[in-house]
Amino acid sequence: MPENSKSERDQRGAAFHEAGHAVVAWALGLAVERVEIAINADDAKGAADIEYNPALDLIDQIAICAAGLEAQRLFDAPTHHGAGWGDYGKMVELLEDREEDKQLEMMHRGRERAFDLISLHRAKVDRLAMAVIEKKCVGKDDIAALLAD
């Protein structure tokens, strides 16, 4: 898709970012209710409503957080420089009781896990992102259909 404007670039970046979160969560067995971009007229703003499971392995929880930026990187879908700050904040919160070197190691492992899952399900990330770019908001039934094999 040629990017003709900042708006299109931001929407594409947001769509791949949120699709990354959604597909990694789905791959880890979590329900995904909604993926949306261009929220409140902000083309770069997106959200993915993902089931929360505190029993999920910590590296997998970090992978879900890291998946947005990993998807943007893998699909060459940049957006503004602030993208991912909220995700980084969630990772820091998950790891706040650990020493700094352990935090960095676990963030690295989480990013690797996200990268591996996005690479494995690359076509699903692409399909979901394209649907989100087209519709701006995709609900759970459409998500389930797009992520089916």
Image (spheres, grey):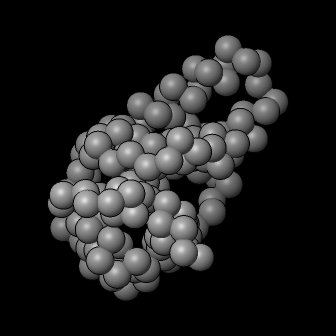
Q: Is residue 125 left or right of residue 23?
A: left
Q: Position of residue 140 (x, y in %)?
A: 43, 81
Q: Position of residue 147 (x, y in %)?
A: 28, 69
Nearest the viewer among 77 and 54 is 77
The answer to whether residue 82 of the structure is visible from this angle is yes
Q: Quadrant of the C terminus?
A: bottom left
Q: Residue furthest top?
A: 101
Q: Position of residue 22 (x, y in %)?
A: 43, 61
Residue at (54, 63) in percent of width and height: 45
Q: How many marks?
A: 0
The answer to whether residue 117 of the structure is visible from this angle is no
Nearest the viewer among 65 and 7 is 7
- Occupied quadrant, residue 23: bottom left
Residue at (45, 43) in percent of width and height: 69
- In the displayed structure, would residue 66 be above or below residue 46? above
- In the displayed structure, would residue 74 be above or below residue 30? above
Q: Quadrant of the N terminus?
A: bottom left
Q: Is residue 110 left or right of residue 8?
A: right
Q: Residue furthest front?
A: 5
Residue at (73, 18) in percent of width and height: 100
- In the displayed structure, would residue 54 be above or below residue 117? below
- Occupied quadrant, residue 97: top right
Nearest the viewer among 106 and 91 is 91
Residue at (29, 77) in percent of width and height: 134
Q: Position of residue 63 (x, y in %)?
A: 50, 42
